[in-house]
């Protein structure tokens, strides 16, 4: 049995699996290069990728004889240590989807197999004279060499992304210096491991607040914040005599995804109203009631504006009888129940939140590829806000709670509202890319059904009450926001 040839064939399989994992998971579904929390993972990936590039190219048509066999064993040892370290970091920083976990398991088994087969050859190679002996394997060698080039490029890309995220981490540390209260208070946060929630909890901890997190995955949440926050899996774990001063309710399943079937709609409702009802039930039995409940909602509350309707929608604008609006109405009503127990409820209607995570990565992807342009008509309004201004807005409401009206609503959108075509044009200019490629709306209608309204329709929502309160946005216009983020 030619163990060397079998090892090379398994390496070829490793190249294909690795390419799938990198493109599908790391780039598309998980968008690791845009995640500040993935910086260490990307650094490990970069190092491993460069090692694999060396292995693929070096083993594609050469046998490592003499002292080179020892070098090969050392490279294998380093690769194994990096793989184990990668597993630990992944589990600490994010919840892997099932497909990625399965892919990583198969990669680990396959990698172990080809490394073992190659190790079987090292005694014979070590006994030979020190040289890199030319042993081509035809098209298999060509394919392995191409894999080596590809994984090397991927490693360089991950390394550059890790360096970029290091700069972003500095910005986030600066952004986290947000003042919420002059004293240390007890804060309960839901949705804490999401895009906004993660940054919020870090800012709260940096400000000296005592944070309790409600999470379906307590272990991961505890790791994410280095054990500095208390984590509970359900409201039942929070005793009635536990003091909570402020509740910030951000929990809710991501609305953009699978088609809105009746089952999917029920899941979206439950993730918002179901959890909120659990919070209200705890408030009802709490010995000391929270003073303030800051509750997330969305500008989907206002439904959609017809093309050509350029009215500015303030907090007093009426909702509509379509699903996205009804979902927000039900969510807000569930939070409003806390008013019964003397808790001041403030509803925060978020526009599209721009940050290193969230929707921005997918919004910019076609522009980065040179395929930016009008989506649908391009005339639909896009109301957005920089995530840093979201955190500052939350702090603003907290600091001004005495003057807040019970059961009030605030639009969390930037003062400058743009059309989708304007967004693409400005983003393309910031990224030094063209913006001329139109994307018709009908394929999205076909794929997403009613959900396509999130992309093809819009609302011109303005932050009237925040501006009335004297809140000053750090990023009031789209260009400054994108320059900061990209």
Image (cartoon, rainbow, N blue to C red):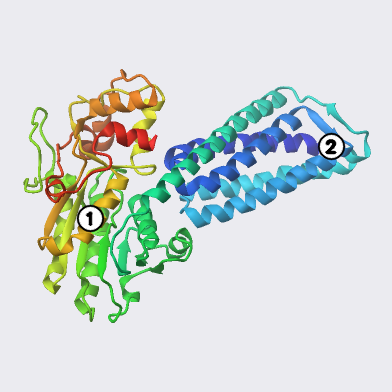
Image quarter (top left, top right, bottom left or bottom right) of the N terminus = top right
Q: Looking at the image, which is closer to me, 95 or 445? A: 95
Q: Quadrant of the C terminus?
A: top left
The answer to whether residue 47 is left or right of residue 384 is right
The tag on residue 396 is 1
Residue 94 at x, y percent in the picture? 47, 53
Is residue 20 something that shows in the picture? no
Question: Percent x, y for residue 468?
Answer: 11, 48
Q: Residues within 10 Å of mark 1 (few under 14, many from 20)?
A: many
Where residue 20 appears, as percent x and y from the top left, is 53, 36
* Relative image position of residue 2 (x, y in whole percent): 81, 36
Q: Quadrant of residue 242?
A: bottom left
Image point 7% across, 45% down: which residue?
317
Residue 68, label in figure: 2
Residue 426 appears left or right of 68: left
Relative to 395, say whether 32 is above or below: above
Quadrant of res 30:
top left
* Structural distance between the alpha carbons of marks 1 and 2: 63 Å
The residue positioned 39% from the left and 31% from the top of the image is 365
Dot 1 falls on a residue whose secondary structure is helix
- Closest to the camera, between mark 1 and mark 2, is 1
Residue 363 is at least partly visible in this image: yes
């Amino acid at each position: 049995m030619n163990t060397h040839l079998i090892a090379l064939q398994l390496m070829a399989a490793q190249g294909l699996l690795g390419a799938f994992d990198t493109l599908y998971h790391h780039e598309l579904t998980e968008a690791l290069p845009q995640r500040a929390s993935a910086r260490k993972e990307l650094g490990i990936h970069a190092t491993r990728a460069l090692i694999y590039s060396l292995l693929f190219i070096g083993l594609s048509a050469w046998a490592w004889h003499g002292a080179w066999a020892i070098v090969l064993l050392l490279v294998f040892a380093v690769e194994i240590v990096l793989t184990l370290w990668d597993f630990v970091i992944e589990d600490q920083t994010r919840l892997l989807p099932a497909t990625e976990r399965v892919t990583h398991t198969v990669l680990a088994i396959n990698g172990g197999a080809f490394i073992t087969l190659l190790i079987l050859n090292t005694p014979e190679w070590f006994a030979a004279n020190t040289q890199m002996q030319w042993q081509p394997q035809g098209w298999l060698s060509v394919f392995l060499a191409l894999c080596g080039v590809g994984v090397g490029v991927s490693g360089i890309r991950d390394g550059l992304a890790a360096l970029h995220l290091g700069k972003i981490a500095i910005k986030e540390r600066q952004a986290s210096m947000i003042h919420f209260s002059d004293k240390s208070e007890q804060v309960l946060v839901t949705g804490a491991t999401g895009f906004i929630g993660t940054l919020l909890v870090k800012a709260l901890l940096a400000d000296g607040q005592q944070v309790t997190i409600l999470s379906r995955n307590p272990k991961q949440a505890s790791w994410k914040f280095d054990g500095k926050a208390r984590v509970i899996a359900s409201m039942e774990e929070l005793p009635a005599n536990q003091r909570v001063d402020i509740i910030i309710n951000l929990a809710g399943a991501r609305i953009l995804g699978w088609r809105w079937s009746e089952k999917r709609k029920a899941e979206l409702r439950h993730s918002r109203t179901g959890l909120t009802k659990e919070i209200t039930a705890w408030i009802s039995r709490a010995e000391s009631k929270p003073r303030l409940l800051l509750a997330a909602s969305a500008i989907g509350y206002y439904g959609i504006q017809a093309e050509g309707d350029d009215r500015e929608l303030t907090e007093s604008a009426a909702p509509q009888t379509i699903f996205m609006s009804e979902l927000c109405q039900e969510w807000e009503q569930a939070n409003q129940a806390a008013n019964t127990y003397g808790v001041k409820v403030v509803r925060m209607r978020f526009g599209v939140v721009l940050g290193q995570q969230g929707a921005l990565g997918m919004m910019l992807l076609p522009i980065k590829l040179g395929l930016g342009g009008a989506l649908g008509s391009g005339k639909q309004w896009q109301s957005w806000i920089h995530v840093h201004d979201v955190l500052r807005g939350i702090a603003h409401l907290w600091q001004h709670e005495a003057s807040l009206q019970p059961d009030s609503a605030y639009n969390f959108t930037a003062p400058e509202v743009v059309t989708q075509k304007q967004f693409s044009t400005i983003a393309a200019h910031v990224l030094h890319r063209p913006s001329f490629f139109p994307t018709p709306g009908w394929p999205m209608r076909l794929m997403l059904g009613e959900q396509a309204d999130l992309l093809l329709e819009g609302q011109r929502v303005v932050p009237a009450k925040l501006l009335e309160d004297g809140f000053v946005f750090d990023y009031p216009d789209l260009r400054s926001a994108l320059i900061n983020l990209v």
